[in-house]
Amino acid sequence: MAQRASTWCLTIRKGPKVGSTYPLHGGTITIGRQAGNHIIIDDPKVSRHHARLTWQGSTFLIEDLGSANGVWVNNARITQSTALRTGDVIGLSQEVLLVFSDQPQADETMYDAAARSGPAPVMVPPSPQSTAPATRSGQGWLAFGLGGVMAILAMVALAVVGLAIYLLVLRPEPTLEPQMAMTSLAPAPTATPYPTYTPVPAEAPTATPYPTYTPVPTEAPTATPYPTYTLYPTATPRPAPAQAQPPQPTTTLVPTATTLPPYTVTLGRNVVYEPWGRPANPDGCNGPYDDESPVRRFTVEVILTNNSNRFIPDHWSPVFISASGNPLPTCIWYYNNTTVQPGEIIDVTFATHTEANDWVKALVFDELNYTLTVCLGPSGQAVPCQ
């Protein structure tokens, strides 16, 4: 049986208001930073209108609304509408994670209801007067039992003492005459010594010496001298008769392969302009953002290939050049473990902010003592540099 839309919810695992749960009631649900969305997440890396959920059949479909950081489902960036399943983790940036799941189960609801119903009733112990007669009766039986045991022990002790006295008084004294007679009649035995054995001397074995071998002399090899070769006389070339020489063909030189630069840079899929609020931070990158003062945020994914045998250190970044000549800040967006090893290819996402009527004209890189410029058009596409 298909589940209803009301049985699903989104829970914030990481980000503002962590732990908050938003029930999903079907239809279309929008997520973003700006007021007017069904789910508002006030985070600087969340776009104004970031993502949209649509109920279809038995689950929700999620799609990206052209955000700067994209929508990630289980660490994979989506490029089209994607069906969600229970337990899916939705990422709107590195700092905002949502979990798509069912509503809380019945046992959790019962637990919450029990917790809200108030404290458990207090149990009042019974009055001490009701147990007094039983206590006195038990004490009487205990005293009677101890007295009987002590009486039995005393009678056993008297019987043991009487038996001991009887044995001591009536035991007859032993006589010594039979023992003395037996002693006088039995002669003491004479000990026979063990015979002495003379060991038979063992003859010493005669060792047979190993025979002495005379080595056979090895004959010295006779070296065979290399044969002597007589050089053939060099023939004297005869002069060729004078005749007209045919024209020689012209040799076309093969161009030498061009050496690759130390590194190359290309643009990835995430290259987008979108409306944004002016950053309040002095570095021009971080929020809070003033939506009343609009600017344009330019997000660009850079793919760098290291063609050299040297390492490109961490924290490399381009310089943004605007079409108006105004300086632009370089904002690091996704930048994890970006030390580029020889032969490695790595992608990093950067961003900047321009005025509403301005755009980024070029990206300039300066690494490994080599300067590389990537020229851009007004919409962010790569163009030949003039």
Image (cartoon, rainbow, N blue to C red):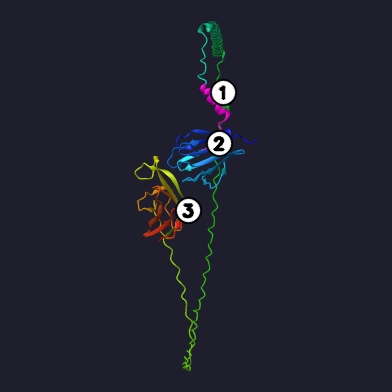
* Residues in magenta, as a range: 99-116
Q: CA distance from mark 2 to mark 1?
A: 107 Å
Above or below residue 315? Residue 10 is above
Element type at marker 1?
A: helix
Residue at disc 2, secondary structure: strand
Q: Are marks 3 and 2 in contact (CB under 8 Å)?
A: no
| Quadrant where the image shows the N terminus | top right
Earlier in the chain: of badge 3 and badge 1, it is 1
Query: Residues under labels 3 and 2: Cα distance?
Result: 33 Å
- Determine contact: label 3, label 1, CB under 8 Å: no
- Place of residue 193 in the rendered image (x, y in percent of width and height, measured from the top left): 54, 40
For mark 1, what is the residue? 179
Which residue is drawn at the image coordinates 53% and 25% (left, top)?
112
Query: What's the amino acid at mark 2?
Result: Ser
Question: Which mark is first along the chain, 2 or 3?
Answer: 2
Residue under circle 3? 268
Q: Nearer the viewer, mark 2 or mark 1?
A: 2
156 lies left or right of 231: right
| Residue drawn at the location 42% of the way across and 59% of the way down | 263
Question: How far is mark 3 from mark 1, CA to CA?
Answer: 124 Å
At 38% from the left and 60% from the top, the residue drawn is 370
